[in-house]
Image: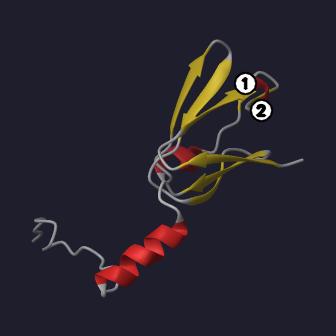
Amino acid sequence: MITTYEVIEYGKRTFDSADFVRDGRVELNPEAQSKAKMTFGWADGRVRVQAGGMIGIVPLNDSVLLEVTPRVPIARLEELIRRSASAPLRRTKFQSGLHTG
């Protein structure tokens, strides 16, 4: 059975360690930390997860999904984009001050 929990972007959530320990081993999706930029900690037999800046559904293991929602409601983001009268731009290496080569 898969259980989905919600957390707000950059928010924290605490889980019972039984959700992550099976047969004495910790089951945790390594990409949740590396790609989704989540941090994990252990305290008082519980697992503490802090979401990073990624929005969406992140599988923490085979039975736990974390749905990360934006701090700003989507409707508000759409309004900000509409009022700015321009589409969101993706930063390039030159805009960020990074120069390669």
Gap in angstroms between the C-alphas marked 1 and 2: 5 Å
Residue ID for mark 2: 19
**Residue 53 in picture, x, y percent from top left:** 44, 53
User: Does residue 30 appear to the left or right of 46 in the view shown?
Assistant: left
Give the residue drawn at x 84%, y 49%.
2
Q: Is residue 3 above or below residue 45?
A: below
Colour setup of the view: secondary structure
User: Does residue 28 appear to the left or right of 31 in the view shown?
Assistant: right
Residue ID for mark 1: 17
Q: Residues within 10 Å of mark 2 (few under 14, many from 20)?
A: some
Identified by mark 1, the residue type is Ser
Q: Residues within 10 Å of mark 1 (few under 14, many from 20)?
A: some
The numbered dot on residue 72 is none
Identified by mark 2, the residue type is Asp
Q: Is residue 100 above or below residue 67?
A: below
Give the residue drawn at x 9%, y 71%.
101
Q: Nearer the viewer, residue 46 or 29?
A: 46
Q: Nearer the viewer, residue 36 or 74?
A: 74
Question: What count of labels does the image hold?
Answer: 2
Residue occupying the far top of the picture: 44
Secondary structure beneath dot 2 equals helix
**Residue 64 in picture, x, y percent from top left:** 75, 44
**Residue 36 in picture, x, y percent from top left:** 50, 52
Give the residue drawn at x 49%, y 57%.
54
Q: Are marks 1 and 2 in contact (CB under 8 Å)?
A: yes
Secondary structure beneath dot 1 equals helix
**Residue 55 in picture, x, y percent from top left:** 53, 59
Q: Is residue 36 above or below residue 20?
A: below
User: Does residue 93 appear to the left or right of 65 in the view shown?
Assistant: left
